[in-house]
Image (cartoon, grey):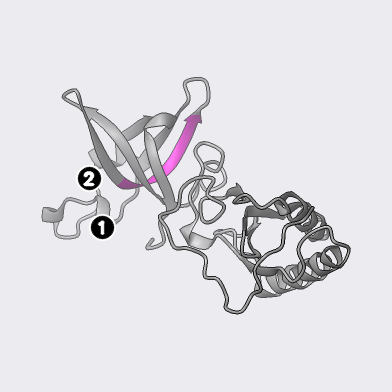
Amino acid sequence: MIEDVEPIDLWEEEEEVEPEIGDGGDGGGIVFQSCSWGEQALSIARDVLLPFGDDMELYSFKTSPHGYIYVRLDKLPNNFGCPSMDEMEEFSRQYKKRLDEAGALGKIPEDLAIEVSSPGAERLIKVPDDLSRFKDRPMRVSYIEEMNSRKVEKSGIFFMESIDAESGSCIWKLVDVKENRDPTSKGRPLSRKQKDWRLKLPYAMVKKVTLYLNY
């Protein structure tokens, strides 16, 4: 039996929280939040996405008990994964039509509301799955480093140079940007030593990776 959802009088704003991998939002993944109709709504979304081809994927999908569906579409060839407005509007139109049809048949609640967007620059980069895709773009990496038997959290702007799947680690090199330069260098570029330095990080020591935009 499909449970009822509350009538939609005011738009429910998606809660703004620090993104985490798999949160159904900027962290990607699928989250149903106890909605029994979530699987059916997801299946319909995947069917609607098929005609868009292999270049488009569901980045995240989240349902709300109040009758809302939040979808983020990922355009693989785009630098930031952003589909065009026309593509998002067409998906939204087709998806809403299919949801209304399923609702009329009693397969899901009627009058579900949808919000379609893209992950954009705020997306979290999954380690190691997304690294090869964004290897040509600078990334802000927060990581844990052991110093004198203590674990210290650090961050920097890096290019991903390589992945060592056997050891479960990745190799990073510094990007020549202000955040990585010595504050006393008065704007001078990275030194040869800094350019040659490499950071090898086990996947488990990487806390968070996002795209760096000011390059």
Q: Does 117 appear in magenta?
A: no
Q: Name the residue type under label 2.
A: Ser
Q: Could one spot residue 197 in this view of the protein?
A: no
Residue 171 place in picture, x, y as percent: 41, 33
Q: Is residue 158 magenta?
A: yes
Splitting the image into 4 quarters, where does residue 55 fall? bottom right
Considering the numbered disc 2 on the image, is that residue within a helix, a strand or a loop?
loop
Q: Which residues are magenta?
A: 156-163
Where residue 155 sits, quadrant-wise, is top left
107 or 44, nearer to the observer? 107
Q: Position of residue 91 (x, y in %)?
A: 75, 67
- The residue singled out by tag 1 in the image is 178
Residue at horizontal 67 percent and vertical 54 percent from the top: 58
Mark 1: give few (<14), some (14-19) or many (20+) Cα within 10 Å.
some
Circles 2 and 1: CB distance less than 8 Å? no
Q: Nearer the viewer, mark 2 or mark 1?
A: 1
Left or right: where 169 falls relative to 181: right
Vertical side of 94 occupied by 34: above or below: above
Q: Is residue 199 above or below residue 77?
A: above
Q: Residue at x 42, y 46 (%)?
A: 209
**Left or right: 199, with 79 as reference point:** left
Numbered mark located on residue 191 in the image: 2
Q: Is residue 64 above or below residue 171?
A: below
N-terminal of the two: label 2 or label 1?
1
Is 206 left or right of 23, judged from the image as shown? left
